[in-house]
Image: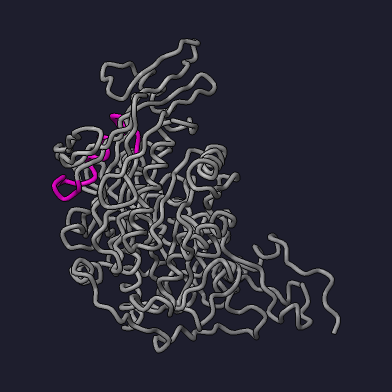
C-alpha cells in the first residue's frame, strides 16, 4: 500500500470543506466555530486514503478524537457504571450534609464548596462524581488541579489502594495526553490548569464528545482568575460544554479585583454554596488543632542607604523599612545562632519527641523563598541539625509541574524521612498526612498563602489522634496577625509557644514530654546580618530549671475563619 506523500490538509482546504458542509461538523452536525474544526481523511491516510478534497471532511475535535483511524462513523458507546466501586467508609458529617445541596444544584449552576485543609474535600469531589455517574446523570469527569503533585493525590484517592473513597478509573497526565481519546474504559481524566491552557481546544473536545455529559471539578479554583490565562481557558473549554461544574477550595478567598471563573461572589468575597470551617473541623475531630511557635529576638541588617540597624521583634515603634528588614533577616539568614536555626532545631526536637512517643513517621516541612534559599536551608540542616541532607522539592524552572519536585514529594510522602524543604510545592492540596511541623521561612505574606501552608499540618491521623500540628514563624506582627485569624475561636487551639533570643542563655524543648533544656551561645554574622541570643520557651506557666516561664496566649478573636 502506497501512502500519500502529503499527510495533512491545509487550513484553507479545511475552511472550504466546512463552508460546503453548511458550517457544521460533518459527523455530529453540531454548529461549531471554524477555529475548533479539523481536516479529516474520510478514508484514513494510514489505510491509503488520499490527501485530496474528495477525501476531506471538516469535523470537530471531539469527533476526530473518537474517529481516529476507524471507518466513517460516530461511536456513541459510553463509560459503563459497572466499572465503578463505591466507598467502603461512611461519609463525614459535613460531607453528608453537603451532598444533597450540591447534587440538587449542579445541573443548574456552577457550585462552590469550601472545606478547610484536611477536611476531606478530595474525597467529597469523588463521592459527588461517583453518585452522578452511578445514576447515569454524567458519563465523564474532568478534574482540574494546580500541579502534578496534587494530581497524584487525586489519582491515589480514586484508586483501589484507597478504600476510604470511591474507586473511579481516571486517567492522568503521567500516562495519557490530551490529544489522545480518553477511551470508554475510563470515566475521565485528572489534568492541570497549565495543560488546560496548553490544550484548550482538546479539552473542549473531550467535554463535548458526542453523547457525553461531563462533570468538571476545579480543585483550588482560586487559580482560575476570570481575566487570567488559566481562567480564560477554563471558560473557553467548559462554559458551554460541561453538564455541571463543581469548584472546591480549602481556604476563603477574595474575588473583588479579579473575579474567579464559575465562582459566585458577594461584596468582593467568594460565596460558597456550602462552607465547612476549621473551627467546626476541630470540634468534629476532622482536623488537628495547630500550635504556633513565635521566634523573637534581635536582627541586624543593612538597608539600601548603607545604614546598619539592630531591631528586635519586641520593638513596636519601627518604620516599615526596618520592619521589612527585620523579617527578611530572620527568614533569609540561616547560620549559627540565627533565628531560623533556632526554629529548625526546635522543630526537629519536636519531631523527635513525637517519634519517641509512638508517632514513628512524624515529619516536618520547611517552606523557603526560592531554590537558593532552600539549598542553604537544606545544607545547614545537614551540617548542624540532622547530620544528613533532607529531601528538597524545588523547581528552578518556577514550574509547579516540574517532574523533579513532583516526584520528590511523591517519594517523600511514602517514606519515613523526617524533613522536606520546599518552595511553592507543598502549600495547597498536597496531602502528606504525616506532616506535624512547619517552619515558615518564606516571604509569602498573604492570608491565603499563610492558611494554605498552615493547612499542611492539620490533617488527622487515626494512629496518632492526640498530637497537634505545630507552625514555627518569626514573631513579625503581620504573621502573628494572620495566625490569630486562623480560627474564630482561639480557645480551640493550644496556647502558643514563644522562643526569645537575647544572647545570654538558651532553653529548648527536649525530646521527651517535659522540658529538657540545652544551653549554648547562638550568635552568627554574615554579610552584615546577625541574629543571636537567649532562647526561652513560654507555655502554660510551666517552670524549667533556669527559671519560671509564663504563658503568652493569643486572645484576639479573628474576623473570619480558616
Of residues 71 and 199, the one nearer the viewer is: 199
Residue at 50 percent of width and 58 percent of height: 409
Of residues 280 and 3, the one nearer the viewer is: 280
The furthest residue to the front: 545
- In the depicted structure, whether residue 350 falls above or below residue 112: above
Residue at 28 percent of width and 33 percent of height: 536
Please state the horizontal and vertical placement of residue 265, each as a whole percent of the image.
Answer: 26, 48
Quadrant where the N terminus sits is bottom right
- In the depicted structure, whether residue 102 falls above or below residue 166: above
Of residues 78 and 19, the one nearer the viewer is: 78
Of residues 520 and 223, the one nearer the viewer is: 520
| Any part of residue 452 in sight | no
Residue at 43 percent of width and 62 percent of height: 238
Q: Write down the region rendered in magenta.
A: 473-494
| Any part of residue 435 in sight | yes
The furthest residue to the bottom: 82
Quadrant of residue 49 within the rendered picture:
bottom right
- The magenta stretch spans residue 488: yes
Colour convention of the picture: one colour
Is 330 on the left or on the right of 371, as rendered?
left
Quadrant of residue 27 within the rendered picture:
bottom right
Quadrant of residue 96 within the rendered picture:
bottom left
Please state the horizontal and vertical placement of residue 279, each as a whole percent of the image.
Answer: 18, 53
- The magenta stretch spans residue 16: no
Is 538 on the left or on the right of 36, as rendered?
left
Please state the horizontal and vertical placement of residue 281, each as a whole percent of the image.
Answer: 21, 59
Question: How many numbered marks, from 0 up?
Answer: 0
Please state the horizontal and vertical placement of residue 76, each as a whole percent of the image.
Answer: 49, 84
Amino acid at each position: 500500500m502506497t501512502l500519500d506523500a502529503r499527510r495533512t490538509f491545509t487550513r484553507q482546504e479545511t475552511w472550504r470543506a466546512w463552508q460546503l458542509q453548511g458550517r457544521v461538523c460533518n459527523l455530529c452536525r453540531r454548529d461549531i466555530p471554524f477555529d475548533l474544526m479539523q481536516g479529516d481523511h474520510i478514508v484514513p491516510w494510514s489505510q491509503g486514503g488520499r490527501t485530496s478534497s474528495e477525501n476531506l471532511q471538516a469535523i470537530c475535535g471531539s469527533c476526530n478524537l473518537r474517529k481516529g483511524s476507524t471507518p466513517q462513523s460516530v461511536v456513541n458507546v459510553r463509560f459503563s457504571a459497572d466499572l465503578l466501586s463505591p466507598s467502603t467508609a461512611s461519609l463525614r458529617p459535613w460531607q453528608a450534609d453537603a451532598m444533597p445541596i450540591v447534587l440538587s444544584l449542579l445541573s443548574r449552576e456552577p457550585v462552590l464548596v469550601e472545606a478547610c485543609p484536611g477536611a476531606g474535600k478530595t474525597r467529597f469531589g469523588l463521592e459527588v462524581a461517583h453518585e452522578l455517574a452511578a445514576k447515569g446523570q454524567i458519563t465523564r469527569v474532568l478534574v482540574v488541579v494546580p500541579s502534578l503533585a496534587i494530581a497524584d493525590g487525586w489519582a491515589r484517592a480514586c484508586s483501589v489502594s484507597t478504600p476510604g473513597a470511591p474507586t473511579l478509573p481516571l486517567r492522568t497526565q503521567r500516562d495519557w495526553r490530551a490529544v489522545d481519546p480518553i477511551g470508554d474504559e475510563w470515566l475521565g481524566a485528572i489534568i492541570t490548569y497549565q495543560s488546560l491552557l496548553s490544550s484548550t481546544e482538546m479539552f473542549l473536545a473531550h467535554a463535548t464528545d458526542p453523547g457525553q455529559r461531563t462533570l468538571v471539578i476545579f480543585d483550588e479554583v482560586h487559580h482560575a482568575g476570570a481575566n487570567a490565562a488559566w481562567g480564560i481557558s477554563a471558560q473557553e473549554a467548559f462554559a458551554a460544554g460541561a453538564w455541571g461544574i463543581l469548584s472546591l477550595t480549602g481556604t476563603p478567598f477574595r474575588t473583588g479585583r479579579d473575579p474567579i471563573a464559575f465562582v459566585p461572589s458577594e461584596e468582593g468575597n467568594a460565596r460558597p454554596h456550602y462552607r465547612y470551617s476549621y473551627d467546626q473541623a476541630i470540634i468534629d475531630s476532622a482536623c488537628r488543632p495547630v500550635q504556633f511557635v513565635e521566634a523573637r529576638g534581635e536582627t541586624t541588617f543593612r538597608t539600601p542607604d548603607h545604614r546598619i540597624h539592630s531591631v528586635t521583634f519586641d520593638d513596636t515603634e519601627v518604620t516599615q523599612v526596618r520592619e521589612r528588614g527585620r523579617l527578611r533577616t530572620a527568614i533569609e539568614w540561616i547560620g549559627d545562632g540565627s533565628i531560623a536555626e533556632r526554629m529548625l532545631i526546635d522543630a526537629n526536637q519536636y519531631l523527635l519527641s513525637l517519634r519517641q512517643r509512638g508517632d514513628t513517621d512524624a515529619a516536618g516541612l520547611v517552606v523557603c523563598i526560592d531554590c537558593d534559599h532552600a539549598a542553604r536551608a537544606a545544607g545547614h540542616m545537614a551540617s548542624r541539625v540532622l547530620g544528613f541532607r533532607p529531601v528538597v522539592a524545588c523547581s528552578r524552572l518556577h514550574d509547579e509541574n516540574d517532574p523533579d519536585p513532583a516526584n520528590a514529594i511523591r517519594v517523600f510522602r511514602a517514606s519515613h524521612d523526617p524533613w522536606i524543604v520546599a518552595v511553592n510545592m507543598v502549600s495547597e492540596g498536597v496531602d502528606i498526612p504525616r506532616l506535624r511541623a512547619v517552619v515558615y521561612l518564606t516571604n509569602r505574606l498573604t492570608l491565603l498563602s499563610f492558611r494554605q501552608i498552615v493547612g499542611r499540618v492539620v490533617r488527622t491521623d487515626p494512629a496518632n489522634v492526640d498530637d497537634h500540628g505545630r507552625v514555627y514563624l518569626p514573631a513579625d506582627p503581620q504573621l502573628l496577625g494572620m495566625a490569630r485569624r486562623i480560627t474564630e475561636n482561639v480557645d480551640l487551639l493550644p496556647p502558643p509557644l514563644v522562643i526569645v533570643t537575647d544572647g545570654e542563655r538558651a532553653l529548648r524543648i527536649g525530646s521527651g514530654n517535659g522540658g529538657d533544656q540545652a544551653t549554648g551561645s547562638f550568635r552568627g554574622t554574615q554579610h552584615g546580618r546577625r541574629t543571636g541570643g537567649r532562647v526561652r520557651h513560654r507555655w502554660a506557666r510551666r517552670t524549667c530549671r533556669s527559671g519560671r516561664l509564663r504563658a503568652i496566649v493569643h486572645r484576639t478573636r479573628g474576623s473570619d475563619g480558616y
